Image (spheres, rainbow, N blue to C red):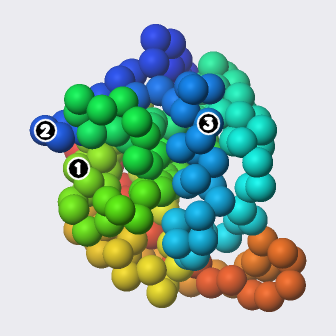
Amino acid sequence: MLRLNFTPFPTLTTERLLLRQVFPADANEIFFLRSNQTVLQFINMPPIATTEQAMQWIEKITLGQDNGNCINWGISIKGNEKIIGNICFWKISSKNSRAETGYTLHPDFHGKGIMQEAMEKILEYGFDVMKLQGVEAYTSPSNSQSTKLLERNGFIRQTIIKEKDASGAANFENAIYILKNPKL
């Protein structure tokens, strides 16, 4: 059974990126990521409407991290602390040693290999430090960039599920991908 403690927060680095804790000072960037239609077009969640809602989200993830239930890194380019995206493990199951990953990225940074760099680093952390046995990811089958990212990192598509969309009105499709810890 996992016993997770994210204090102090595990800041991670790659060749180009700093993956760091999200702070209240990042509320404007979080507001953009959680309200921009391009960012949200394949994610089944309603956009937020205010920076106050962004602050509430930051408080929620901070509490989740303090309790060992999730970990969420803000993605920034080294030398510039401004967040351009985020990547996380959430829905962490201590019993099953599994977690779900999720991520967003500012459209200006799409197609530059940034999410690939971030994904490799958090998977390394998840398997080596957290001792996860597996990671799940949900993505729209229409989201070719996300699908390619997951497959490039060894995730295998399991099935497609239909859910109600964020408004509760229509069906929303998600493909479920699984990656087992390659070291087990």
Q: The residue tagged with tag 3: helix, strand or loop?
A: helix
Residue furthest right as drawn: 168
In this picture, residue 78 sits left or right of residue 135: left
Between residues 150 and 133, which one lies in front from this camera angle? Answer: 150
Residues at marks 1 and 3 touching, judged by CB atoms closer than 8 Å:
no
Q: CA distance from mark 1 to mark 3?
A: 24 Å
In this picture, residue 31 sits left or right of residue 171: left
Neighbours of disc 1 within 10 Å: few (<14), some (14-19), many (20+): some
Specify the quadrant that holds the N terminus.
Answer: top right
In this picture, residue 112 sits left or right of residue 174: left
Q: Which mark is residue 38?
A: none
Tell me the kind of residue under disc 3. Ala
Task: Give the image location of residue 179, x and y in percent.
Answer: 37, 59
In this picture, residue 116 sits left or right of residue 43: left
Task: Give the image location of residue 22, x and y in percent.
Answer: 52, 30
User: Mark 2 vs mark 3: which is more N-terminal?
Assistant: 2
Q: Residue at x 35, y 62 (%)?
A: 108
Q: Residue at x 23, y 33 (%)?
A: 78
Between residues 56 and 168, which one lies in front from this camera angle? Answer: 56
> Count the marks: how many?
3
Q: The residue tagged with tag 1: helix, strand or loop?
A: helix
Q: CA distance from mark 1 to mark 2?
A: 8 Å
* Residue at the spot of label 3: 27
* Residue at the spot of label 1: 117
Neighbours of disc 3 within 10 Å: few (<14), some (14-19), many (20+): many
User: Mark 1 vs mark 2: which is more N-terminal?
Assistant: 2
* Residue at the spot of label 2: 15
Specify the quadrant that holds the C terminus.
Answer: top left
